[in-house]
Amino acid sequence: MHLESSEAQASEKVRPYLSIVVPARNEEATIAAVVERSFQAFAQMGCSGEVLVVNDGSTDRTGEVLAKLQERFPALRVFTHRRGRGMTAALQTMFSASRGEIVILIPADMESDPLLDIPALVTKLEQDDLDVVAGWRQGRRDNKVLASKIYNFVMDRVANVHVHDGNWIKAMRREVVESFPPLRSDWHRFLLMIAVHNGFRLGEVPTVYRPRQAGSSKFGWERIPKSFLDVLVLKFLLTFSEAPMRFFGGLGLIALTISAAVFTYLVLLYVLAETQQRPVFIAAGVLAIIGVLLILVGFLAELIVAQGERITELEKRFAGRRENAD
């Protein structure tokens, strides 16, 4: 009994080469084809792989279809969200559970054909020695082209993500996935932004465009304002999360400099022209107080970051000791 348990634990620790992650919500008509063609891609490439699917609060037969597929494919792992929590939460679940050396994000609607796109992504990743490869839809013709162009323009200008189709399928090495912070909101749209900020090498490969044959798109124009705000938040966190004093202290120094300049002007005005401007004096005083408060916030933020780094280091040590004990 103990021998069987040890063998099971050893087999669990053997990493598959590929992990395909598939967020699915109400995709009963296409999810079977995605799973089947993913395993066909493994066989065609001659490598080991697993498929992870999150059933994200589906109200159709998606769950039943996945249960039957699990009987055919032991390497299919299904996670269920009782309610729809969105793609970011689904990816967070699958990224944490995935074991492959390369993690590939594929949609559940068959707009991407796994049998064609998985080999294309992996081949590009390996041949060009890249860390991340994004798919680039060729001949795309749907009602999201304009929104996609706006997104890619913002990513190019704000985040230095120089690809044509940043919010599509992508393959990432294990270290890229492990570098992601806890994902929230709609941050699944900005995985490339995070990867580029962390210094990983990015490339792209053309992929075949396949119009959706069944179901409906889960994307709408109403998400654009929310996504824009997410870009600003994520850009701020990536730039200043490790050195918040640079942001808050910088604003504080600017406020103090302006306040000092105004006070100097008021003193000269009083000495030379014997004139007082009390509203300006009060405004300069308030600005000075704001500047000091911003610098204090910067110090507090630095303390929080330092404590967070200590906690992370302790967690790593604890995890290492637990692995050694096992």
Image: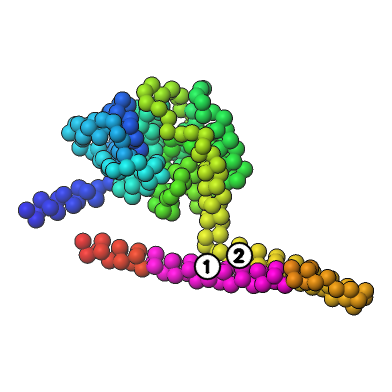
Q: Position of residue 68 (x, y in %)?
A: 20, 31
Q: Residue pushed farthest left?
A: 1
| Mark 1 vs 2: CB contact within 8 A | yes
Extreme-right residue of the structure = 273
Residue 285 vertical position relative to residue 198 in the rendered view, above or below: below
The image quarter in which residue 62 lies: top left
Circle 2 packing at 10 Å, graded few (<14), some (14-19), many (20+), is many
Q: Would residue 168 be found to the left or right of residue 110 on screen?
A: right
Q: Is residue 201 visible?
A: no
Residue at 43% over, 22% down = 211
The answer to whether 67 appears left or right of 204 in the picture is left
Residue 48 image label? none
- The image shows residue 228, relative to residue 268, as above or below, that is above
Q: Nearer the viewer, residue 272 or 325?
A: 272
Within-10-Å neighbours for mark 1: few <14, some 14–19, many 20+: some
x and y percent of residue 85 in the render?
A: 37, 44
Q: Main secondary structure of the magenta part?
A: helix
Residue extent of the magenta highlight: 285-313
> Mark 2 — residue?
248
Q: Which residue is mark 1?
A: 301
Q: Residue 284's x, y, as percent?
A: 74, 69
| Residue at the image position 35 percent from the left and 38 percent from the top | 23
Q: Is residue 213 above or below residue 57?
A: above
